[in-house]
Amino acid sequence: MDYEINYENIKKELKKNNAKRVLIQLPDGLKKDYAIIEENLKGDYELFFWLGSCYGACDIPTYIKDYGFDFIIHLGHLEFVKED
């Protein structure tokens, strides 16, 4: 793996938000490592991986609440920057 994921920080956020059904959205380059990511994020919640297209953090599947997901994780995307 040529990238770093702060799994502990993600797990803290999941616990803080009392997540139960978590959708993880990965860009194509990280999809091959889903099993490693899943293993490192296991917890008291269900993990699901988005296998559809993903063109960045703005490409959110807005209908996810229809499937009972209460938390979404985007990995491999840059943060949005707020301008003053």
Image (cartoon, rainbow, N blue to C red):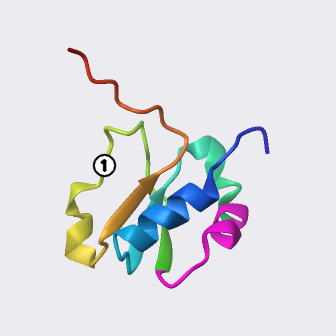
Predominant secondary structure in magenta? helix
Q: In this image, 8 relative to 3: left or right?
A: left
Compared with residue 71, is residue 79 higher up or lower down, i.e. above or below?
above
Compared with residue 31, is residue 35 higher up or lower down, i.e. above or below?
below
Q: The disc labelled 1 sits on which kind of residue?
A: Ile
Q: Give the residue drawn at x 44%, y 56%.
A: 73
Q: Give the residue drawn at x 48%, y 37%.
A: 77
Crowding at label 1, few (<14), some or many (≥20) Cα neighbours within 10 Å? few
Inspect the magenta stretch and tell me whether residue 78 lies in it: no
**Image location of residue 47, percent across then percent down:** 50, 75
Q: Give the residue drawn at x 53%, y 44%.
A: 27
Q: Quadrant of the N terminus?
A: top right
Q: Give the residue drawn at x 58%, y 44%.
A: 28
Compared with residue 43, is residue 50 higher up or lower down, i.e. above or below?
above
**Image location of residue 53, percent across then percent down:** 44, 47
What range is drawn magenta here? 35-45
Q: Which residue is mark 1?
A: 60
Q: In this image, 77 relative to 60: left or right?
A: right
Nearer to the camera, 22 or 26: 22
Q: In this image, 25 relative to 69: left or right?
A: right
